[in-house]
Amino acid sequence: MARTDAIVLGAGIVGVSTALQLVKRGLSVALVDRRAPGEETSYGNSGIIEGNTVFPPAFPDLPGLIRVALKQVPEANYHLSFLPTIAPWLLAFRAATRAAKLIEHARLVRPLFAQAVDEHEMLMQEANATRYLRKTGWLKLYRGDESFKKLKPELETAASFGIPLERIDVAAARALEPSLAPVFAHAVFWQSAVSLSNPLAVTRAYAARFAGLGGITLSGDARTLHRNGTRWRVETGEGPIDADRAVIALGPWAPDVLEPLGIRLPMTYKRGYHRHFRAQGDAGLSRPVLDADNGYVITPMEQGIRVTTGAEFASRDAPPTPVQFDRLLPKARALFPLGEQIGETWMGSRPTFPDSRPVIGRAPKYETLWLAIGHTHWGLTLGPVTGRLIGEMMTGAVPFCDPAPFRAERFT
Ligand SMILES: Cc1cc2nc3c(=O)[nH]c(=O)nc-3n(C[C@H](O)[C@H](O)[C@H](O)COP(=O)(O)OP(=O)(O)OC[C@H]3O[C@@H](n4cnc5c(N)ncnc54)[C@H](O)[C@@H]3O)c2cc1C
C-alpha cells in the first residue's frame, strides 16, 4: 500500500491541472483515472481559453423557449424523458440568469477568468506545449440585428472590466477570416481570447509535466474512494493508495462518488457534440468562430475544422442523439466551405450547476475532501486557475482570489 499527501480523482484538464499545481507546491500526489489523461470532456471541446467570458448562457425568452420546445433551433436540444428530472434545475437556472443576476455573476467570476490565460500560458511554457497555443482571439458573428442589440449589457460589462473587444463590420470580419461568407450582419472580435489546436495534447503535456515533477499517475476506479481511518483510500491497478486529502475532479462523473458519501449537489449535464470536417479547396480558419444565432462554433484543430454544438439536456448516460447537426450543418456550410466529414461524431457532457459557477473548495461534511467540479462551458479555460486556487487553499497560502463564490455550501 502506497501513501501520498493527496489523491486527485479524475485526469481531465481540471484534475491534471490541479495535480500539477499541487505537486509544484511540494505535495506528493497520485492522479487516478480509469482512462488516460484528457480523453473525456477535455478532449472534445472547442479549444477556447475564454478569459473574456462575462455572462453565462441565459435561459431563453418566451419566443426562444417555444422554438427550443418545438426542437426548431440548432443551439439546443432535449430529451422529453429527462424534463421531469431537470425541471427544478431549469427553474434555478432561469432565476440565476435574470438581468441583475448576470451582472452579479460576471463580477463574482471575473477574478478566475481574468487569470485564466496567464495561468495556462505558464503551465504551457513549463510543459513545452506552447506550440498548441494560438493568440488570435475569438470571432462572434450575429446574423440579425436583434441578437446583436441584446448584447449591449454584456459588452458594457466587459468594457467596465477592461476586456479588449471590437465591434466590427462584415468586411473587417472577413479581413480576419477571408473564408467566411457574408451571411452575417455584425461581429464582435474578442482579441484577448486564445485557443488551442489540440486540447487533448495540452492535457497530456500537463500530465507529463506532473510526472516529470514526481507525480504518480494510476489507473483506478474513483468509486472505490472510502475512509480508511483518518485517511482516504482508493483501489488502483497497482493496489490501494492512501492519502490525507482527496480532490474530486471527475467532471460530469463527480456525483457517482459524492452521492454515496452523502453529498448531493444540483449538477446537471449540458451534453455537446463535435464533428471534424476537411475544408474545401484552400479555405481555412485562423481562430474559433461562433455563429451566435445558431449556437455552434467552428474552430480549426489539428484534426480538421471542428464543429461543436450547443447544449443538449439529457441524461449523461443516455445514447447520443446528435440531431443538432441536422439543424446546424446547412447554416455552417453556408458560412464556411466545409468539405467531407473526418472520423466519428463525438459526445461529451458539460457538468453544470444552475448558477453556472464551478464548485472549488472543501466538500461539505468532510474537512479533507476537496471539490473541483462543475466547470460547464469553461473547464478548459479554468482548469489551471482552479488547480491554483485548490493548491493555495490546501497549503494555507493566501488564495489569489476570493474563493467564497465557489463554495459548495451555496447549495446547502
Ligand atoms: C462541445 C463542447 C465544447 C466545449 N468548449 C469549451 C471551450 O471552448 N472552452 C472551455 O473552456 N471549455 C469548453 N467546454 C467545457 C470543457 O470541455 C469542460 O468543462 C471540461 O473538459 C471539464 O473538464 P473536467 O476535467 O472537469 O472533466 P473531464 O475532462 O470529463 O474529466 C473527468 C475525468 O474523470 C474520469 N472519471 C470519470 N469517472 C471515473 C471513475 N469512476 N473512476 C476513475 N476516473 C473516472 C474520466 O475518465 C475523465 O478523465 C466544452 C464542452 C463541450 C462538451
Image: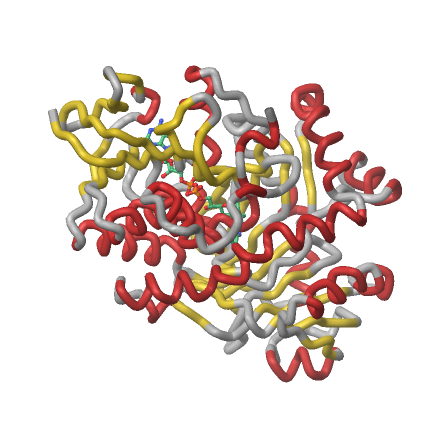
Residue at the spot x=51%, y=45% of the render?
403
Residue 350 in view here: no
The structure residue drawn at horizontal position 44% and vertical position 51%, both measured from the top left corner, is 399
User: Would you place residue 210 above or below residue 172 in this image?
Assistant: above
Give the camera-side residue of 47 and 70: 47
Percent from the top left, x then y, of residue 85? 66, 20
The image quadrant where one finds the N terminus is: top left
The quadrant of the picture occupied by the C terminus is top right
Front-most of residues 335 and 269: 269
User: Where 333 falls versus 59 (above or below)?
Assistant: below
- Residue extending farthest to the left is 1
Residue plotted at (85% across, 38% down): 66
**Along the horizontal axis of the image, is 131 left or right of 4?**
right
Q: Quadrant of ligand 1?
A: top left
Tell me which colouring the rendered structure shows: secondary structure
Q: Is residue 32 left or right of residue 95?
A: left
Please indicate, yes or no, whether residue 352 appears anywhere in the rendered image.
yes
Residue at 73% from the left image edge and 49% from the top image edge: 102
Q: Is residue 206 above or below residue 132?
A: above
Query: Where is residue 285 drawn, in percent x and y?
Result: 53, 72
Q: In screen coordinates, is 77 left or right of 254?
A: right
**Above or below, comparing residue 260 to residue 30 in the picture:** above
Q: Which of the two residues, 299 or 401, is positioned nearer the viewer here?
A: 401
Q: Position of residue 149 (x, y in %)?
A: 84, 64
Q: Position of residue 205 (x, y in %)?
A: 28, 57
Callout count: 0
